[in-house]
Amino acid sequence: MKQGGQSFGSHLRSLREAKARTDPAFSLRQLAQRCGVTPPYLSRLERDEVAPPSEEVLRLLAAELGEDTDVMLALGGKISTDLRAAILARPKLFAELIRSLKDVPDHAVLRLVRDVADGDW
């Protein structure tokens, strides 16, 4: 998956390299170890040579790199378990909602999210 033209692997690599510039704990080897994957596997992820990992590994990578978990999951082509359950509870309604929001500007979607969260609807 791509965000703003950037693939999952290149996004992952740019996040890690930005951290590694100021903190040696973000070397490929050290990050891989903390996330429970091998350095060669993480390298292959960064080069988009393998499919993105499991939700668990994506969550660990997001936490380590300071990335929003939902963004990391989406770039990895995954949906979090809690969102999947919500969608499966009302699949037709959620499909219709998402399709109708795909061309709505971000500020309008944000307002809708805030209204729903506040119960103002």
Image: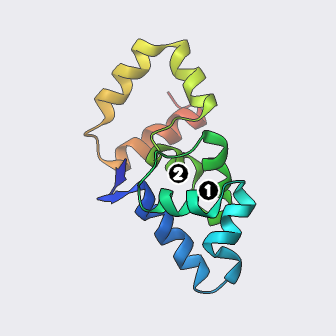
Q: Residue at horizontal 65%, vertical 58%?
A: 38
Residue toward you, 121 or 50: 50
Q: Secondary structure at mark 2?
A: helix
**Among numbered discs 1 and 2, the one appearing first in the sequence:** 1
Q: Quadrant of residue 53?
A: top right
Q: State the residue position of label 1.
A: 62
Marker disc for residue 72 = 2
Q: Is residue 93 above or below residue 52?
A: above
Q: Residue at horizontal 66%, vertical 70%?
A: 29
Q: Residue at horizontal 63%, vertical 29%?
A: 82
Marker disc for residue 36 = none
Looking at the image, the residue that sits furthest to the bottom is: 22
At label 1, the amino acid type is Ala
Residue toward you, 37 or 109: 37
Residue toward you, 13 or 49: 49
Residue 4, x across and y down, in percent: 31, 58
Q: Is residue 28 above or below residue 77?
A: below
Mark 2 nearby-residue class (10 Å; few <14, some 14–19, many ≥20)? many
Q: Is residue 86 above or below residue 42?
A: above
Cα distance in 3D space between marks 1 and 2 = 6 Å
At label 2, the amino acid type is Met
Q: Residue at horizontal 56%, vertical 71%?
A: 16
Residue 103, x across and y down, in percent: 25, 39
Residue 77, x across and y down, in percent: 45, 40
